[in-house]
Image (cartoon, helix red, strand yellow):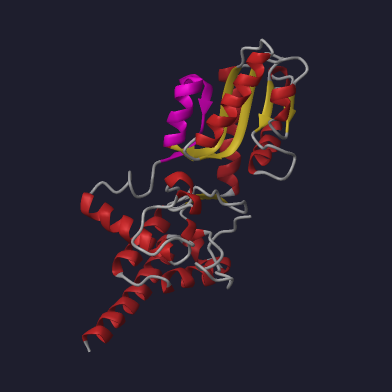
Amino acid sequence: MQIELNFMNIDINKNLSQIELLENVPWLARERYSIAINNLFSECDTDDQIWLICKLLSEFKLLNSTEFTDSITLIAKHINSVWCFKDDAIICATSDSDKPDGSQSIIRALEVDLNPKNYNAIYNNISPAFFNKKNSSTILLVDDFLGTGTTMLRKIQRLKNHLEKKDVIPTIYFACLAGMNEGFENLKKILGDKNVFIPIIFTKAISENITDDEQRKKAINAMLELEYKILPITPYPRKINFKEYNFGFNLSEALYCQEGANIPNNVFPIFWKGNLSGESKSRKALFHRV
């Protein structure tokens, strides 16, 4: 009888928590999210898991079109009025190829507001930064989201090494629509405080934003339990497996997506992973990731 009562209490808590969440986070009430949010709550087995899902979704930033345009305007103003490049500067998306990429959408949006006197050319990928014929020393790299910064730092180091072999000492700038504070700080250490601009910055949702030690431990355990259901990993309990995006790529703990865009892999995978662990059966997730 006690076990039945516990399960009944959990079900009631799920329903009440879900109703309250939908009232406080209006975008979750849209039809496109209804099946996914029901599935997410059905995957919760404990009150701690329910509490964590509600907390994270109440803090989740879904960037709408107006906010996107406003942020693009801020980046363009910073390029035009603060950095004030000369006409030999080149601006490149961080994509490695011309295939569709989030950084390319930022480049296209920025181009409308940029002063053409402040750059020589704009490109849809990073290759021209390596092979520009004029050996431009001023290079602006543009991306849509920055996580820990490790991937970007590797690209920047490769670019520096390549150009220095051609006797070009580059001054590299970086602009991004949104990103994690960890990555922001990591890039500033390499490029300089004044050479990095990100208008929307986040801190880690659990390890940094939950300051109470006991609550933070509960939140970590609850997330590990939830992720165990969707990530193909060794039996629980286990160490965090970076390859399978536990807590987001490189433990980013991000809570962000641009509306209508591909969600960053830095976000907790419970919000975008499309199937359960070890199963081909499709799992309806809140957000889409290619």
Q: Residue at x 52, y 28 (%)?
A: 197
Q: Residue at x 59, y 71 (%)?
A: 280
Please give the range of residues in magenta. 182-202
Q: Residue at x 68, y 26 (%)?
A: 91
Q: Is residue 119 above or below residue 249?
A: above
Magenta stretch prevailing secondary structure = helix
User: Within the magenta stretch, is there residue 214?
Assistant: no
Q: Quadrant of residue 79?
A: top right
Q: Quadrant of the N terminus?
A: bottom left
Q: Quadrant of residue 141?
A: top right
**Residue 86 in the image, given as x and y percentages of width and height:** 67, 13
**Residue 158 in the image, given as x and y percentages of width and height:** 61, 26
Q: Would residue 204 be visible to someone looking at this image? A: yes
Q: Is residue 229 above or below residue 179?
A: below
Q: Is residue 110 left or right of residue 44?
A: right
**As drawn, which residue projects farthest toward the top?**
167
**As drawn, which residue projects farthest toward the front?**
234
User: Within the magenta stretch, is there residue 188?
Assistant: yes
Q: Is residue 57 above or below residue 249?
A: below
